[in-house]
Image (cartoon, rainbow, N blue to C red):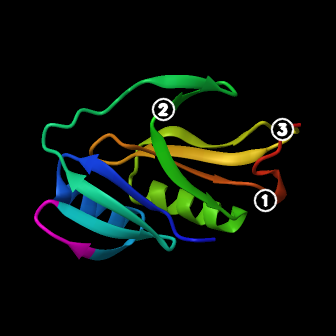
């Protein structure tokens, strides 16, 4: 799989460095006064400074949760999911959606959790017991 690139706005680069580096454990790459590259499991995500950004709070209902419409994240294995959930709790992250199982007993059953970064960007981390179910319809 080729690495993806995602750029997203943040209102404070120091806070972004703390969250993505210290809380999530992403290595920092290149940077300037207005942006910072992070390595998210081999993918390049870039926090771009936008001091006037406002977080979007719009949500959609998904299996009983109010899921932020704009979000990004990673699909992990179950061990990695549990390790990250523990790390996020230890670092005092605020969960939008606590770690839970979604679509239990159905196609696409998955573990999921959502957090916000200091700028209000929503991140989802999920894991499938069977990665063959990532795109399952039924």
Q: Is the magenta stretch mostly helix, strand or loop?
A: loop
Magenta residue span: 30-34
Q: Which of the two residues, 94 or 121, is positioned nearer the viewer here? A: 121
Does 69 sit left or right of 2 as displayed? left
Secondary structure state at the residue bearing disc 1: helix
Label number found at residue 68:
2
Q: How crowded is mark 3: few (under 14 residues within 10 Å), some or many (20 or more)?
A: few
Residue at image coords 82%, 44%: 136
Label number found at residue 137:
3
- Quadrant where the image shows the N terminus: bottom right
Residue at image coords 83%, 57%: 132
Occupied quadrant, residue 17: bottom left
Q: How crowded is mark 1: few (under 14 residues within 10 Å), some or many (20 or more)?
A: some
Residue at image coords 14%, 59%: 34
Does 127 sit left or right of 97 as displayed? right
Earlier sequence position, callout 2 versus callout 1: 2
Q: How crowded is mark 2: few (under 14 residues within 10 Å), some or many (20 or more)?
A: many
Q: Position of residue 43 (x, y in %)?
A: 48, 68
Task: Indicate yes or no whether the magenta region holds residue 25.
Answer: no
Which residue bears the numbered disc 1?
A: 131
Gap in angstroms between the C-alphas marked 1 and 3 = 13 Å
Earlier sequence position, callout 2 versus callout 3: 2
Gap in angstroms between the C-alphas marked 2 and 1 = 23 Å
Q: Where is residue 125 in the image (x, y as percent from the top left)?
A: 57, 52
Earlier sequence position, callout 1 versus callout 3: 1
Q: Where is residue 127 in the image (x, y as percent from the top left)?
A: 69, 55
Q: Looking at the image, is 65 positioned above or below residue 111?
A: above
Does 103 sit left or right of 24 as displayed? right
| CB atoms of marks 1 and 3 within 8 Å | no
- Quadrant where the image shows the C terminus: top right
């Amino acid at each position: 799989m080729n690495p993806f690139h995602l750029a997203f706005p943040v209102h404070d680069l120091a806070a972004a460095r703390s969250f993505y580096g210290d809380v999530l454990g992403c290595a920092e790459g290149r940077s300037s006064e207005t942006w910072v590259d992070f390595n998210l499991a081999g993918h390049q995500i870039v926090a771009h400074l936008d001091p006037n950004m406002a977080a979007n709070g719009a949500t959609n209902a998904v299996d009983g949760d109010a899921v932020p419409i704009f979000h990004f994240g990673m699909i992990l294995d179950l061990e990695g999911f549990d390790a990250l959930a523990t790390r996020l709790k230890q670092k005092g992250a605020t969960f939008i959606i606590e770690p839970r199982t979604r679509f239990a007993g159905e196609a696409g059953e998955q573990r999921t959790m959502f957090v916000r970064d200091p700028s209000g960007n929503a991140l989802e981390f999920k894991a499938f017991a069977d990665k063959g179910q990532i795109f399952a319809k039924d």
